[in-house]
Amino acid sequence: MAYIAMRLYRGVQLTDSAARLLVGYARRRAGRKPWGVLGLDIYSGGGETLLIARPTAAVAVHIADYALPALCKYLPD
């Protein structure tokens, strides 16, 4: 399994979207395609931040045609 680990400078705080952007940039700089779906673990402590990113499987949901009417009765009006 491939992963990316980054140690960020003191005082740097990351949002989820900024972390995703940073990981995509790192992959492109390495000559690789960005991951479509990725998992992020962000740890902060002692003024520093550790970012660990890894690819994850995309979640797909398929609803059968015959189940749709039954599910619609639970939707709010």
Image: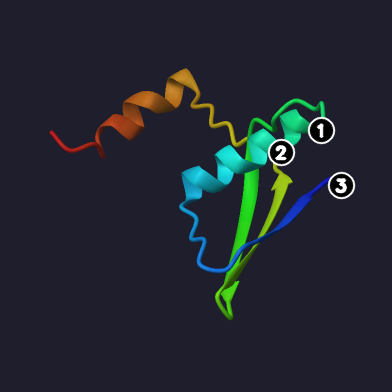
Q: Secondary structure at mark 2?
A: helix
Q: How many residues crowd around disc 1 within 10 Å: few (fewer than 14), some, or many (20 or more)?
A: few
Dot 2 alpha-carbon crowd within 10 angstroms: few under 14, some 14 to 19, many 20 or more = some
Question: Which residue was labeled with disc 1?
Answer: 30
Label 3's element? loop
Q: SS of the residue at dot 1?
A: loop
Quarter residue 46 falls in = bottom right
- Disc 3 marks which residue? 1
x and y, in percent, of residue 69 in the image: 33, 25
What amino acid is at disc 2? Ala
Q: Is residue 26 left or right of residue 10?
A: right
Identify the residue at the far bottom of this view. Answer: 46
Q: Are marks 3 and 2 in contact (CB under 8 Å)?
A: no
> Disc 3 to disc 2, how far (Cα)?
17 Å
Q: Which residue is mark 2?
A: 26
Camera-nearest label, 1 or 3: 1
Real-space Cα distance between discs 1 and 2?
A: 6 Å
Three-letter code, disc 1: Ala
